[in-house]
Amino acid sequence: MMNAAERDLRERLAQIGRTLFSEGLTHGTSGNISARISGSDKCLIKPSGYCLGDLKPEHFLIVDNRTREVLEGNGVPSIETPFHTTLYNLRPEVGGVVHLHPHYSVILSITGSEIIPMNMDVYDAPALARGIAISEFAPPGSEKLAENLAEALRQGVAALMPHHGITTVGKTPEEAAQNARVTERLAKVQYETSQVGDPKALPEAVLSELVELAVRKGLLI
Ligand SMILES: [Zn+2]
């Protein structure tokens, strides 16, 4: 039986999917989102083959984070279920995982450029001041990709995946989505800045203040 908390979480995930799609952060059926079912070793995850903009609350599948078995729902869970579940198992505080292929982040992932906060957008997701890791390349859906992302996201909230995209985490799926949205804004500013001059990082003192701000706000860091 679905309880009120699960129904609410399903509605929130569908809303997040629609918003990320309408913001142009994902195209076609790419990208996937999930949320931990509070206090459990289970998550709700996007089914494979759906566009993030078309998701309805009932589409999400319940998956066991340990066995990756589908416990409830029809359809095939996202191809990236291995890394979503690995991140929940690795970090008990993670309540949401977002994976996207946003345009500017993908460009920087191909050139191997680290996304470094250089402007005030980072105030909208201050945990990113801790740095955006770069994971090692592995094919989509592979066990190796799950291992590489776990390594990159042992701490911090965002990872750039070479030739692929980004994965972000948060205490809630909304927080993970916000970390993804701001990562892409930072990537766009960095890419465009590099066309006209040398990108320069924010002063170290500002970045430390942002990390403190993230802690004060109770964000995952
Ligand atoms: Zn992907």
Image (tube, rainbow, N blue to C red):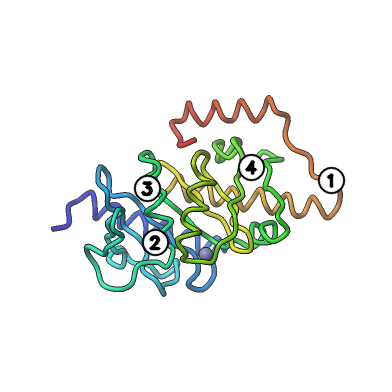
Q: Mark 2 or mark 4: which comes first in sequence?
A: 2
Alpha carbon distance from label 3 to label 1: 38 Å
**Marking on residue 198:** 1
- Which residue is drawn at the image coordinates 50% and 69% (left, top)? 30
Quadrant housing residue 175 = top left
Image coordinates for residue 153, horizontal then vertical, percent? 51, 45
The residue type indicated by label 4 comes to Asp
Q: Residue at the location (26% across, 72% down)?
A: 74
Residue at 25 percent across and 42 percent down: it is: 39
Coordinates of residue 157 in the picture (x, y in percent): 51, 43
Judged from the image, the secondary structure of the residue bearing numbered disc 2 is: helix
Q: Name which of mark 3 and mark 1 comes first in the sequence.
A: 3
User: Could you say which disc has been placed on residue 88 in the image?
Assistant: 3
Q: Answer with mark 2 or mark 1, whichever residue precedes in sequence.
A: 2
Label 1 SS: loop
Q: CA distance from mark 2 to mark 1?
A: 38 Å
Mark 4 and mark 1 in contact? Answer it, CB < 8 Å. no
Q: Identify the residue position indicated by label 2 in the image.
A: 81
